[in-house]
Image (spheres, rainbow, N blue to C red):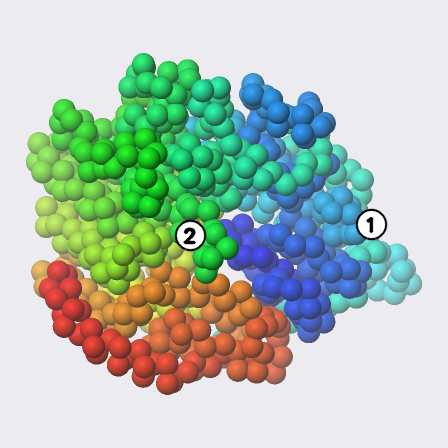
Amino acid sequence: MKILFFCTAFNSLSQRAYLALSEQHYVTIEYALSNELMIEAAELVKPDLIICPFLTTLVPAQVYNNYLTLIVHPGPPGDAGPSALDWLLMGDDGTEPDSRKLLQRKSLSEQGRPYWGVTVLQATADFDMGPVWAFEQFAVDIDQPHITKSSLYRGPVTRAAITAVLKAVDRITIAADARNATAHKSASPPPPASISMSAGKGITERSSNKAAVDPSLVANAVFSQLSVTTGQSFQGGKTLHRPLLRAADRDFDPRIHDAVEISRRIRCADSQPGCLSSLFGPKLYLYGGVVDSGKQAAGSAPGSVIASREDAVCIATCDGKGVWITHVRRVKAKTDASLWPKVPAVQGLAELSEHSMGYKNLQRVVSMRGRQRPGKEEEEEWSRATSSTLQDIWIDFEPASDKDGNIAYVFFDFYNGAMSTKQCRRLLKALQYILSVADEKSVRALVLMGGSYFSNGIHLNVIESAADPALESWFNINAIDDLIYSILHDFPGREIKTIAAIRGNAAAGGVALATACDFVLAGEDVVLNPAYRAMGLHGSEFHSLTYSARCRGDHGKRILRDMMPLSASAAGHLGLVDHVLPGWGASLDSAVKAQVKALTLTSVLVGGGGGGAALPPATPRLCAQGQAGRHAPALCAAPQVGRPNRGRRGRRPLRLGRVVRSQGERRDDDDDDAAAAAAPRGAGDSQRAGKGVCAQRKGAVGQQRHDRGAELEQQRSCAQSKDARDHFLLLL
């Protein structure tokens, strides 16, 4: 079947759906930048089916009247509105139909809903109320530690969505075939949908019955009543149409609301739009919301800052507990050219204090900045906390399978997977601690466990908000390179195996971090995005060493050039991943530990070759210097280093560039050097500037051509900064 995606953003759910459907169907992707573009894309592609995995705008009637269009709604049947997950995590249990009265409550409910779901419905004139083709439900605990809107979306919601989408496509195919068979009783049955492959060209033929699927197909009423997996009705209570939940609707008063309620209001807005509050004086968007059950808040005034840790701040609540604010973002003023970046709380509040005098909480944060936690022994510092609190790095030592020696599991749960200079250095310090006790504890293997994300590489928001973004970029690159150098060099030198367990999505430098290990394990549901080119950067993290060691032929270069997501199984075929493991959550953790123990029994390394055991000592450093030299031109453009494509909504993102042209076809900006020069300068499509139609034609539709003059200008700018770059290269 020929399927067209309309996406507001090619986010994690959209990528998972793309990868799942691409196994049996031909999928084309289009950004929904405007109604005109969606209409034009549909007319050009002429799909059998349109799917909108993540869409925040209405589908034009001209599209859904001519093509069967499916909407993936992150709520069960009967739920409607743009803030489904927000209401869920804030505590809405469906017992109060009046949304205004509900928001006036001190707490929306005591426990919230026990179940939630995802619905795949047909687009009609009635928003989120079309015929249901499939729905799936899952258990949820809204007060589970560290659960946020974004983590819920990436985990249970995405898994349920993939299940429902695949079932909906199957049901549509069956319905179309049945109607076609009824209309042609006297004729032979229609041939099944077929997919033919052409060497080097990918999928060239789609459904042999293109007229079979259209908006007139009728969904069975049972589809909206029984979930796909369990065959049960929705178990989470009454569903309602809720309005947009604004950022200000989540505001709280620490003198009235307890820690759990404040946490709900912050987490239901994380990562967007944020909880708008005047807690620190000026209105800010707050993020984080981890409850601290310790006794440090006892006797403190509710709302006061009582602690600071790892660039986060803890505020006291009226029930004697605390809530950690990990990140803040300033409100965009009319005079601001773009949105303010989301930054670590201490950094953002300290910067704000320079312009906002007289606020006690801001002054308190400044006085705490840089203060270390007293009385912490090194071993205690890296042990997992025994009570609920904020902790982003910890180490678990567990016996190896033969009870001779230990395995060091290192967890690093960084916000959105981004690793700032400070975080890279702290993680390196944790690895150095493992090396310092390796003989005492007989450490046989190091396992990098990551967090809800494994890692997404360097921290672009911290870079963008820095006084000198180019300088901060170099510090961040150096810090993550030092971390990976230790994995490539120090641990093999001590005969300690290194294993990466990718339990959450990974991107850019996070993928390179994993491939530096001797073995790479990945959960079957994870999505990998190894490429940097969409940011106009080359990246570093020794990827030119580890990718070429792991991938056959030129696959290492191709995955960076294509800029398309990889499933765990596809990464396994390429060599980036050694073992794909089933399950998620606790079951995936058990599978990881079982595989790790099996690997520690072997006396030789049989992984993909990412490890540095056989490398000459100078090789990793020479590799890093070469990569940094290529990375330098993009970093010279300091104002754009963090977001080179930011704000250019009318231009198709470069990472979707290969979707618009025939399989195997290359163009001038497929070259890495050309892309690095072009992306920061914003060269647009040569014939279709401001449009993003993603469709098959003879050749490419709207090929992007970069400006050679911009490349030369950038090279001249970098030449002026040569002395500074040479100084930074000494740090590598």
Kindly indicate the quadrant of the structure image that contains residue 631.
Answer: bottom left
Q: Position of residue 363 (x, y in %)?
A: 28, 34
Q: Which mark is residue 218?
A: 1
What SS does tag 2 mark?
Answer: loop
Please report contact status of discs 1 and 2: CB closer than 8 Å, yes or no.
no
Task: Look at the image and tell me whether residue 252 can be seen.
Answer: yes
Which image quarter holds the C terminus?
bottom left
Going by the image, does 256 lie left or right of 673? right
**Residue 340 has which mark?**
2
Q: Which of the 4 quarters of the picture holds residue 391?
A: top left
Q: Which mark is residue 243?
A: none
**What residue is at 39 percent from the left and 30 percent from the top?**
290
Q: Judge left or right: residue 722 versus residue 447.
A: left
Question: Which residue sits at x=54%, y=50%?
Answer: 13
* Residue sitting nearer the eye, 314 or 388: 314
- Going by the numbered disc 1, the residue's amino acid type is Val
Residue 444 can be seen in this image: no
Residue reaching furthest right?
A: 186
Look at 31% across and 78% down and name the residue there.
714
Disc 1 element:
loop
Q: 10 Å neighbourhood of mark 2: few (<14), some, or many (≥20)?
A: some
Which is closer to the viewer, label 1 or label 2? Answer: 2
Calculate the distance from the C-alpha at mark 1 to the C-alpha at mark 2. Answer: 47 Å
Q: Is residue 720 left or right of residue 81?
A: left
- The amino acid marked with disc number 2 is Trp
The image position of residue 172, as x and y in percent, is: 74, 53
Within-10-Å neighbours for mark 1: few <14, some 14–19, many 20+:
some
Using the image as rendered, state which of residue 628 and residue 51 is in the foreground.
Answer: 628
